[in-house]
Image (cartoon, rainbow, N blue to C red):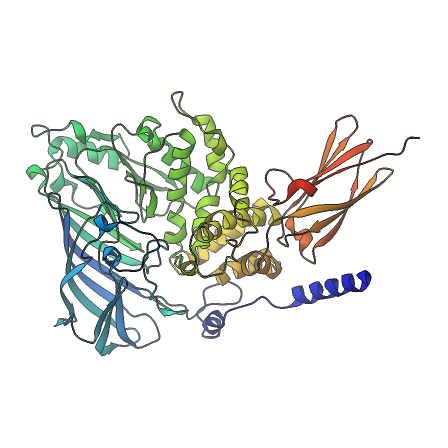
Amino acid sequence: MKKLLLLFVLLNTTVLFSQEMFVPKEIEKSVKNGVRTENGLPGNKYWQNSSDYKIDVKVDSYTQVLSGKAEITYYNNSPDELDKLVLRTYQDFSIAGKSRDWEIGNDNFSEGMKISSMKINGENVDLKSKSVSRAGTNLTVKLNNKIGAGDKTSITIEWSFKILKNFPRMGMYDSTSYMVAYWYPQMAVYDDVDGWDMTDYKGQVEFYNDFSNFDVSITTDRRNMCVWATGVLQNPDYVFNEKFLQEYKSGAEGKNFFTVDCSKLNKENQLTKNDGNVIWHYQALAVPDFAFAMSDHYYWKMKSVDAGGGKSTNLNIAFRPEANAVKYDVFNVAVKLLDYFANTFPRVPYPYPSMTVFNGDGGMEFPMMVNDDDTQTWESTVYLTSHEMSHTFFPFYMGINERKYAWMDEGWAVYLPQEFQTKMGRFAPDNAVRDTSRSDSRAANVKAYLRNAGTLNDIPMLAPSSQLRSPSYRHSAYNKSALVYDILREMLGREKFDGIMKVYIERWNGKHPTPYDFFNTFSDVSGENLDWFWEKWFMEYGYADLRISSVMINDNTAEITLMNKGGMPVPVVLSFIDTDGNVSVLERSATEWKNGNTLVVKANVKGKIKKVVLGNKYVPDLYPEDNEMEIKWKEQ
């Protein structure tokens, strides 16, 4: 009976892997319409919509009220006629009674985004009419005149809201220091997969935006109030007093550092003109969002640095003067990271003209900006800076829909800088507080994955991120996905993997890749059918757990039978320890599990083997107690 059962299981395993990979009907439709392809390239009919934003905004630093006016030109590049427009009103997150992923407390309730006027193509929109609805954090306007394929429309809108202390990933950090994000009425994405993105912002899932152009003028009202933003400052001559202007220009030209501690400035030594009543004018092209930050007492360091590929970028850090990150020289950490991106992994130069590391709270990414808490240790400074800056590529340069597929950006932001984080340990300043638990980032991520592996929180990664709650969300988006990328890189070989990764970025930067564009690109460029791998790790339940079933040694040949109990393909690492303490190691990639969950490994061994050990710290194994087998030899 046992033999029959085993035969049945093996037959079913063979049938399973001979089937084609599951493809949702939305993706099939997009391929059929020529927007996407089965080999991972954008189709010859690929399209995406975009906008031009011209915004005037003022932050009243005495009342913390932001007020703005935007002129938006929306381009319908789709083949569809649009009968409505959808805009995001993120600040409605804080209205009492709204659905949220966590409690914010009564003190953080507000009136949300107050829209005082709106026009479409010059005609007033009655915001109280039945043609207008505000649900969650979305504003939907049904149109009297539809927007034809290839046409554009103009929207003018005025709004205001109070900047809160406790809004996810932005807010007021002291009376004159702010990270301003989720701040303007933003056009939602209309795409070839879902049509209008109606996902409500509840605090957890993050970006999915079209690539747009921004022209933003930010008015300040205090002396020495500095503004850092997405894009490039257009009017330094208008903003800075003469002494600081020349130093700023020298920094922007890469000649000298522009360094100023605003906390030490006063009325007689002002950074800005007109007691700070000035307009900071920023422009950013082809980016998916715009954020800015402000403070009148931060330490600011800036210089144009090498970004790789013959490009340079204005690198800024803006921190509280007493911050540990200033002591640890976070500027130099960022410089080394830009070099790592360009020359080590993913071997793509930093693609934007500026980057600002701002000292706010937590850790959050925006195009050309990151919002970072201060950190206590050297390793956490390196980790937080490199993780958030890695988001430059995912989701911004690549246009990821992290509302549905957070693992397509968060996982990469964990994985891209892993080697960088480990290697940076040797550059720690003498006065740095150290955290040895982070000294090997790759091994640390294996441990992080195992915390939730095999639990009810271990959901297949293709499940939409907006449908998950933590810890399922964090497990899928961060640790599990980064682990899978590591396994895939070792399976394909690093040189091959890195080359495919670069092709993937070249194909899809400035566009909106789906998981299937990622899957198909790797299969196409590698020349291997990797459907079995995608199915296992992204579409099925399971976990990483191998077992040694038996060991047979005959002369100098060992035959080891292994079982994949958890079902997920992971590398095979076998260590043979002889009676003299010598160790020999055999390594096989995760490809060994392509055709089933039983594997027989043969190896040439030397000496009298006393123990066989399966795995190492880089191979996850949920139940490692069955990963060793002692060899008992009969006395001669």
Residues 118 and 132: in front is 132
Against 180, residue 50 (above or below) is below
Q: Quadrant of residue 70?
A: bottom left
Residue 229 seen:
no
In this rendering, position of residue 461 left or right of residue 491: left
So how many labels did they put on this image? 0
Whether residue 281 is visible: yes
Instruction: State which quarter of the image contains the C terminus.
Output: top right
- In the foreground, 356 or 7: 7
Instruction: Find residue 612 and report its horizontal and vertical position in percent.
Output: 74, 37
Q: Position of residue 69 (x, y in %)?
A: 14, 58
> Which quarter of the figure has residue 221?
top left
603 shown above or below 517 = above
**x, y percent for residue 63:** 11, 46
Residue farthest to the right, as pictured: 636
Q: Residue at x 77, y 61 (%)?
A: 6
Residue 190 versus residue 441: which sits nearer the camera?
441
Report the residue that reaches farthest toward the front. 106
| Residue ranking furthest to the top | 430
Q: Is residue 211 left or right of residue 550?
A: left
How far from the left and from the top, in percent, is residue 163? 19, 48
Q: The N terminus is located in which quarter?
A: bottom right
* Residue depicted at x 82% and y 31%: 607
Lateral position of residue 37 relative to residue 301, left or right: right
